[in-house]
Amino acid sequence: MSRPLAPRPRFGDQTPPAIFPPVLGALALGLAWRQSADILAAPPAVGELILGAVTLLYLFCVASYALKVVRRPGVLPEDLRVLPGRAGLSAMVLSAYLVSAALVPLAPGAALGVLGAALALHAGLVALVLAALIRGPAEQRRVTPVWHLQFVGFILAALPAQALGFAPLASVLLHVTGAAALAIWGASLVQFLREDVPAPLRPLLAIHLAPACLLGSVALALDNPGLGWAATLFAGLLGAGLLIRLPWLIKAGFSPLWGAFTFPLAALANLLLGLAPGQGTAIGIAGGIVLVAATLAIPPILVAILRAWARGGLGARTNAARV
């Protein structure tokens, strides 16, 4: 007698948060291409097409994860117990800030609404993360690069806030998150000097580059060139260090954590393009080179992670909670 077939899992039952970091990177890539239209004379349609397509993908991913939460709300705190889950859920919220930034020139009212919703969701996520850190085992309270996404990630709200005319809010976010970034960088450096980072977790170190790039971009937008150039110099040093150690970073081979490479690379392209005063400058050319590198790297990582999700193995590989 044949054994009955196991029921196929429903769509969304184990949506892994690991799908969101490369989506965050792809949104930032679209903003970089939009910016390149002024600096590199790139076709304006390229950035808009990327932003439109990735925004639709983002909404699909959010709907899939929301379906999992609706079916069993307990999956949310369970996903926050593991590192890929915390990184992914943070990227999900931060992506909303970039959607808001993308909407600013097209629909300012909608951009403001998305910004407000993102701030509320981010505050709620931080509260859940803090609760998980307090209640969880001591090893979960170790400082990791993912802390930048959770506690420094508010800096992303400053981009649409400044563009929408809320410069004082953007200034507060810049200084508060700058202090948080310095604390996380310092604690991470102490840990790095004391012990080696396991090979599978090394891609997460790329996240350290993102706050420097964002602090520089926001400082320049707020007409603070001194802080902007200081952050740019620091970002350049971090970026050079990561590039030199790239073979060490990827020694464990491809994994879903490679999504951590995507957003910092696109953020660096945005920073350099924002620094360029016009077409043909050395900084603009450097920004163009980083933009090309980001364009070659981010889509393959995004596709590989989405393909793993579609095939059903990404949830198990990243210990995602299921309904």
Image (cartoon, helix red, strand yellow):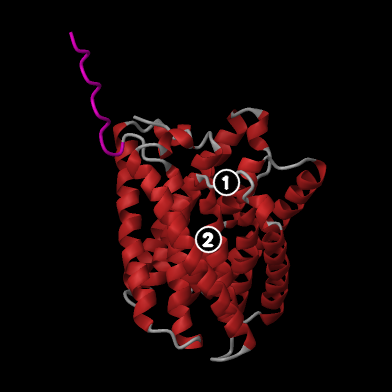
Q: Position of residue 244 (x, y in %)?
A: 71, 61
| Residue found farthest to the front | 1
Task: Quarter of the image for the C terminus: give it.
Answer: top left
Q: Quadrant of residue 140?
A: top right
State the extent of the magenta-drawn residues as a range. Answer: 1-12
39 and 110: which is toward the camera: 39
Task: Quarter of the image for the N terminus: give it.
Answer: top left
Q: In the picture shown, does residue 278 fall above or below 20?
A: below
Tell me which residue sits at (59%, 67%) in the image. 214
Q: Main secondary structure of the magenta part?
A: loop
Residues packed near mark 2 inside 10 Å, few (<14), some (14 to 19) or many (20 plus): many
For the image shown, how many numbered marks are present on the structure?
2
**Which residue matches tag 2?**
263
Chain-order first, disc 1 or disc 2: 1
Q: Secondary structure at mark 2?
A: helix
> Does residue 56 appear in the picture of this structure?
yes
Q: Position of residue 266 (x, y in %)?
A: 53, 67
Distance between the Cα atoms at labels 1 and 2? 19 Å
Whether pointer 1 and pointer 2 mark residues with C-beta atoms closer than 8 Å, the reply is no
Amino acid type at circle 2 is: Phe
Q: Quadrant of residue 176?
A: bottom right
Amino acid type at circle 1 is: Gly
Q: Position of residue 231 (x, y in %)?
A: 69, 71
> Does residue 221 appear in the picture of this structure?
no
**Which residue matches tag 1?**
253
Q: Is residue 10 magenta?
A: yes
